[in-house]
Image (cartoon, grey):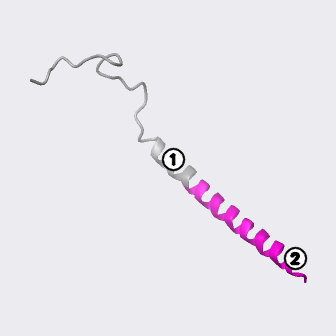
Amino acid sequence: MFEHEIAAAARTTDLLREAAAYHVVREARKAHRATTRGREPRGRVTTPGPRGARSARRSA
């Protein structure tokens, strides 16, 4: 094999390894999200007032 063929083969191997690691992490995140989804609150989150509204208390 020529030097450039060896380098290309090494790069391909590295890319395949990175892709496999990416897929493992992606699947783990999907699984984690699926298990925590049941614990998330449902419905709209309410805030104490409209955005930018001042608090009733004032610091003296």
Q: Name the side, left or right, on which 44 lies relative to 7.
A: left
Residue at (35% x, 23% y) in the render:
46
Task: Name the magenta segment's main secondary structure.
Answer: helix
Query: Which residue, given by chain and number where applicable, does mark 1 sit on?
Result: 33
Residue range (magenta)? 1-28
Residue at (15% x, 20% y) in the render:
57
x and y percentages locating residue 56 in the rendered image: 18, 17
Query: Which residue, given by chain and number where applicable, does mark 2 sit on?
Result: 5
In magenta segment, residue 41: no
> How many neighbours does mark 2 have within 10 angstroms: few (below 14), some (14-19), or many (20 or more)?
few
Relative vertical location of residue 34 with respect to residue 60 in this rendering, above or below: below
Contact check, label 2 and label 1, Cβ < 8 Å:
no
- Looking at this rendering, what residue extends furthest in the left direction? 60
Residue at (64% x, 59% y) in the render:
22
x and y percentages locating residue 24 in the rendered image: 62, 61
In what element is the residue under mark 1?
Answer: helix
In what element is the residue under mark 2?
Answer: helix
